[in-house]
Image: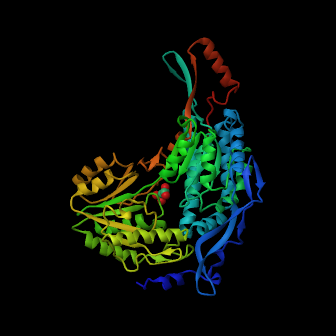
Amino acid sequence: MPTIDFESLQQLFPTDADIPEDARLPAPIHQRVSLVDGELVPWDGACKTVLSPVCVRQASGEAEQVAIGSYPVMGETESDAALDAAVRAYDHGRGAWPTMTVGQRIACMQDFIRRMVAERHQIVNLIMWEIGKSLADSQKEFDRTVSYMQDTIEALKEQDNSNSRFTIAEGTIGQIRRAPLGVVLCMGPYNYPLNETFATLIPALLMGNTVVFKPPQYGTLLFYPLLAAFRDAFPKGVINTIYAPGAVVVPHMLASGKIDVLALIGSSKVADHLKKQHPKSHRLRAILGLDAKNAAIILPDADIDLAVKECLLGALSFNGQRCTALKMLMVHRSIVDTFLERFAAQLGKLKVGMPWEKGVSITPLPGLHRTAYMTAAIDDAKAKGARVVNEGGGVFCQTLFYPAVVYPVQEGMMLYREEQFGPIIPVTPFDDVETALQYVITSDHGQQVSIFGTDPAQIGALVDPLVNQVCRVNLNCQCQRGPDVFPFAGRKDSAEGTLSVTDALRAFSIRSMVAAKQTDESKALLDAMVTDRKSKFVNTGFIF
Ligand code: G3H
């Protein structure tokens, strides 16, 4: 393994001439518009420069984050305009979009997908440059999102077709369908800026809601190529964008009482604060993906090589910047030395470099504040008795941070409870499995857990309490969200609501029904409405 030090990491940053032609952005993107009420409204106010996590070595030899563009910094006036446009487009449920047939909405979405796919190359490059995700993972994020959209359309057809019939109970005829909720404020995270934003935005739109969309702090420009597609594929005002510091405009929008659904992938602290701003909080539906600190419990009879492989993937995919990442490894004391040795050896084989490099695993973090946080967390653990186990762990140069395995991490250290959301792997030993169980029970988080072991009796005994603590127990594999048809949820501070291809359609809608007494008059009335297509809600049509 080559020596890891400041200089060797610095040499991994390219000079401008080293950047391969096909990985370059053709030119910086200086976005000066926002999408409001079906128009790309020009902006000539303040703008924010976007610095890439990628640094470029200068003539001096020093590496500096490269500027890749800029976007508007708006305020309350502009967020009011975006919100009012969404409110008008919804028009108390009478707007063109919420009253369209499901088939018509699907046609608009398919048109949007066609336009989006045409922008794949530019969007993938922007994901890579804006958040430092590897090219392969950026491509995967784009393609997974398109598949998710197509699967959601199929799920909606299925749902609508199964509701295309009347039900008769106790002398009452009813037709039950899912109806929209109103205006949705959509905010995604920086680590999956496209995919997780669209995991809420797309089902919200398909169900007939109108949307105000605020892009994440890192991962804003990548939506620029989609603004015209949004404008052209959907009726005006159905989707509106706002570019502004969240703390300035988001509480303000919620305090207006005009937002019906808060869709946020972010922190529980922010979510708690925002929910309280709504004047009638019972009217606000919240769909939240929040903090997590998923643990791996590695039992004495575990296949160590398998556990090492999965934990490495789980802890370090996209530098550990996944809500589902394994953020605490609890290893039985009898195998902890072997585990640490093999884990550090495998970690040493991971390629560190720039996102466009083939086979790269560890890439730059979004800003210097992140390497500063990682360093503070390691220093805190060291001061309290832990050590960095792997060669070069915790060394950094600018945004590039070499992963650190920290052992033994204990209660009282930042790394024991805080969600590090980065390339640090805290490891703690346990003697009694009850200690590992207690860690999960006493955690503020409740998303997922991984168990590594081979004894059915012991695993069975662990699974039963754990499924009541988290929402997914992974056996001999890392934690993850996919496949996207599976429910993605969390307890405690980790989530509110469930996302998946089908669950998200339910989350952004409510069941509504038309009912009538089972009389000849009612039958004739409903029959005429259906035959003469007098209602879009009351119909027995089938979407193919
Ligand atoms: O960051 C949180 C994501 O939902 C994780 O998704 O498990 O597919 O990487 P993933």
Q: Quarter holding the N terminus?
A: bottom left
Q: Is residue 380 above or below residue 295?
A: below
Q: Is residue 339 left or right of residue 91?
A: left
Query: Could you say which is closer to the camera, residue 392 or residue 316?
Result: 392
Give the answer, above or below, for where 446 lies relative to 408.
above
Of 362 and 494, which appears nearest the observer?
Answer: 494
The picture places residue 466, in percent across and down from the top left corner, at 31, 49
Going by the picture, which residue comes out furthest to the bottom?
A: 60
State the quadrant of the C terminus: top right
Instruction: Locate residue 159: give its quadrant.
Output: top right
Is residue 258 shown left or right of residue 338? right
Q: Position of residue 323 (x, y in %)?
A: 46, 58
Q: Vertical placement of 356 versus 490: above or below?
A: below
Q: Is residue 147 visible?
A: no
Whole-percent x, y for residue 12 in the image: 53, 81
Q: Quadrant of residue 86?
A: top right
Residue 534 image point, x, y percent: 70, 25
What colouring method underlies this structural image? rainbow
Q: Residue furthest top?
A: 520
Q: Nearer the viewer, residue 315 or 382?
A: 382
Is residue 531 at all visible to an observer of this figure? yes
- In this picture, residue 120 sits left or right of residue 274: right
Between 115 and 434, which is closer to the camera in this rendering? Answer: 434
